[in-house]
Amino acid sequence: MKIAVVHDYFTQLGGAEKVAEELMRMLPGADLHATVALPECMPPGLMGVPVKTSWMQNLPGMRRYYRLYFLLYPLALPSLDLSGYDLVLSSSSGYAKGVRTDRDAIHVCYCHTPMRWVWSFENYSAREGMGAAKRLLLPHLVRGLRQWDVGASRQPDHFIANSETVAARILRAYGRIAEVIHPPIDIERFRPTQEQGDYYMVLARLVSYKRIDLAVQACNLLGRRLLVIGDGPDRARLMTNAGPTISFLGLLSDAAVGHHAARCRALIFPGEEDFGMAPLEVAAAGRPTIAYRAGGAVETIIDGVTGIFFDRQEPEDLAEAIARFERIEWNPAILRGHAESFSTNVFQARFRIFLAKVGAPIPEAALLPFNAPSRAAANLGIGPRQEGIPA
């Protein structure tokens, strides 16, 4: 079987890129395609892997201006040659689902979300702080892109969503039913420790919709230490509003992230995410999460067991949740066990079952062995869904 993995673009590092990395690890003989692949934005596991790119690869200023080229990506997709492939897996939060494949090929789209900036433009533009001219012009362009997106959604034979939240969006936007397979969590990067720090942590790309400003303001109000790990266009604004207890560490190595995750009091997760890997990564390190009750967080956090929620995106509500959190004792073994039920091995097993169901079985040799959840997770009944998966 000849297999292609197609990712939107490698212009930043986030959860979608981790999924593309895992798909390639799961399918070592597959070819990797993307409209653009910047070497400095490749996940560690894809460093040195050949990427077949489009003509957009050579456009000037791509690292800085990739968002401004948003109307060109649909035009670049036809230059990705997918003829001769039996199975095409697209990893898409934007464009990759629109690739053309051979008529008898099987195309499965792993959808991280329908285009956020197209289907929620008003919220997105408000958070991005767009000026009046952009907000006047862009709706007309976005309207055309939305029509393209609906047409592109007819290209895949099957959809997989990364969460129930995204599956519902796919149904509303495209009228397509999606299987839910949660993204893979590399739990081996994280280890619990008995050492305890006195700080909270944010682990995210610094973009406005993630609402890191709430974490900054709440920790300003309480005088709590906050480490902000990550980088992005919102960093300068956040630093302007940060008090003396807030530290911005930028991008860190996996080892440094694991060190801070295992010693933080909790992760603060204040935005509405499609899924959100960070709470599960921190749970693998034995630490809980304080999260806004919306989106993927409600599928991955057990209230009072692996974290707590707040219900309004206001600094005072988050501050109250932090104070409430500090009165609760947390069990690192239970947190670790919960994260194990979202591991890369669980992801691979579920993907294998899905592909076999749609007529594209993966050779067994390509897959890593499946590990059952720990005893702590099993005792709480928080292991993976039993869908004929071997344990």
Image (cartoon, grey):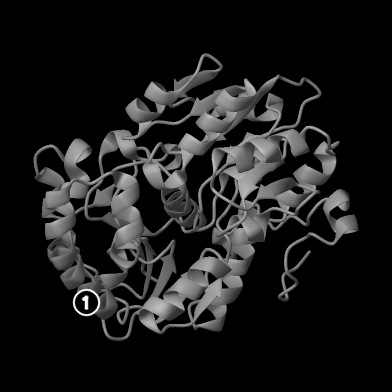
Residue drawn at the location 51% of the way across and 53% of the way down: 272
Q: Secondary structure at mark 1?
A: helix
Can residue 260 be spotted in the picture? Answer: yes
Crowding at mark 1 (Cα within 10 Å: few <14, some 14-19, many 20+): few
Residue 27 position in % (x across, y down)? 47, 59
Q: What quarter of the picture does the N terminus occupy?
A: bottom left
Check the image and report above or below for 51 versus 178. above
Q: What quarter of the picture does the C terminus occupy?
A: bottom right
Closer to us: 217 or 195: 217
Residue drawn at the location 55% of the way across and 78% of the way down: 356
Amino acid marked by disc 1: Gln
Tell whether 365 sits left or right of 328.
Answer: left
Check the image and report above or below for 17 versus 325. below
Residue 149 position in % (x across, y down)? 26, 73
Residue 286 position in % (x across, y down)? 75, 36
Residue drawn at the location 52% of the way across and 70% of the way down: 362
Tell whether 303 sits left or right of 69.
Answer: right
Outermost residue, right side: 379
Check the image and report above or below for 312 versus 148. above
Residue 224 position in % (x across, y down)? 64, 22
Residue drawn at the location 34% of the way across and 80% of the way down: 105
The residue that disc 1 covers is: 147
Can residue 74 be spotted in the picture? Answer: no
